[in-house]
Structure formats: C-alpha cells, structure tokens
Amino acid sequence: METVEQALKIFNLGKSDSQADRHFVDDLKSIFEQEGSGLLAYYEVRQMVFDWLAKQGEEEKRFGGKPTKKGNAFYYYKQAMKYGDLDAAQRYLKKYYELGGDPRPKMQSIKYAHPLASIPGMKRKAFRQSLAMGQSDIFDTALKWYNKTYR
C-alpha cells in the first residue's frame, strides 16, 4: 500500500479535494493492490522456476523469460476484455495480428504463459515439492492471477 501511495504521488495523485479524484485514486489503489500482488507473484514464480531449472542442469530448456511485443499485445487484449474495454481490446487484437499473431495459437500462448510452463509436466510435482511454505503461498497467488488473467 505504501508503494502504491508513493507511485500516486509521483503523478500528483496523492491528495485531492475532488470526490471524482478520490474515487479514481481509490480505484487505482485497489487495482494495484489486487492485480499487482498477483502479477508480482507470477514473475517471482517464473524466476523460481528458472532458478530450479538451473539447479537441475536444465537451464537451456527454459522459455518465456522475456516478453515479446506480440505476447504483450495479446496480454493487453486479454486485460481489456477482462475490464470490458472493447475499443482497447480491438486495438490490441489488431496489433497482435499485425505482429504475426494467429487466431489458432491463442490457446497455445495462454498455455505457455502458465507460471510452470518451462517445466516438463512430469517434473512439475518435484518443483512444487521443493517449495518452502512461503514460496507455496506465492505460487498459489501467481496461479490465481494467471487463471483470472488468462482463463
């Protein structure tokens, strides 16, 4: 919460007498607090996966570490759809296609966005068992965010 308030101050959104501004700031805070924690957990799990693969000697098998423009366009399309912004969704879907996106692989890109996508299916249980309790909580948060965002 403190980080969110600092970010809002950067854009001069910290304090206002306007009721509309206060509602806007409250909405931004809730988005950052809810979405941000899941998004941060998602990237933290991705890093845990990459570290685990490196310990297994399989670091070269990882993928999905660096987002692409096409992947970002698809992500923002999904976000716009989630929030009901059809104009933005249309723009991002058009951008996705311009960057080489194909209607059929949408499901494949969702599959590859899974936090454990870099780990072969038969080794995912071993990864999950290697997590400490705090890491398991982070994984659960990341998985909830993934399902809410991509499903």
Image: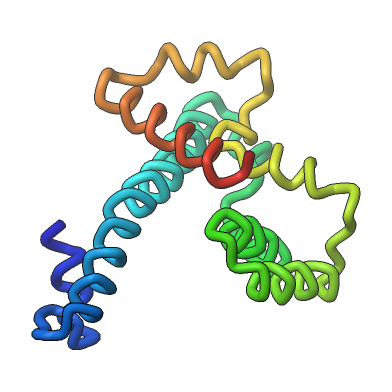
- The image shows residue 76 at horizontal and vertical percentages of 60, 64
On screen, residue 68 above or below 138: below
- The image shows residue 112 at horizontal and vertical percentages of 69, 41
135 sits to left or right of 150: left
11 sits to left or right of 55: left
Residue drawn at x 88%, y 55% is: 103
- The image shows residue 90 at horizontal and vertical percentages of 74, 71
Quadrant of image for the N terminus:
bottom left
The one nearer the camera, 64 or 1, is 1
Q: In which quarter of the image is residue 60?
A: top right
On screen, residue 134 above or below 35: above
- Count of residue discs: 0
78 sits to left or right of 27: right
The one nearer the camera, 57 or 11, is 11
Residue drawn at x 57%, y 18% is: 124
Q: Residue furthest front?
A: 19
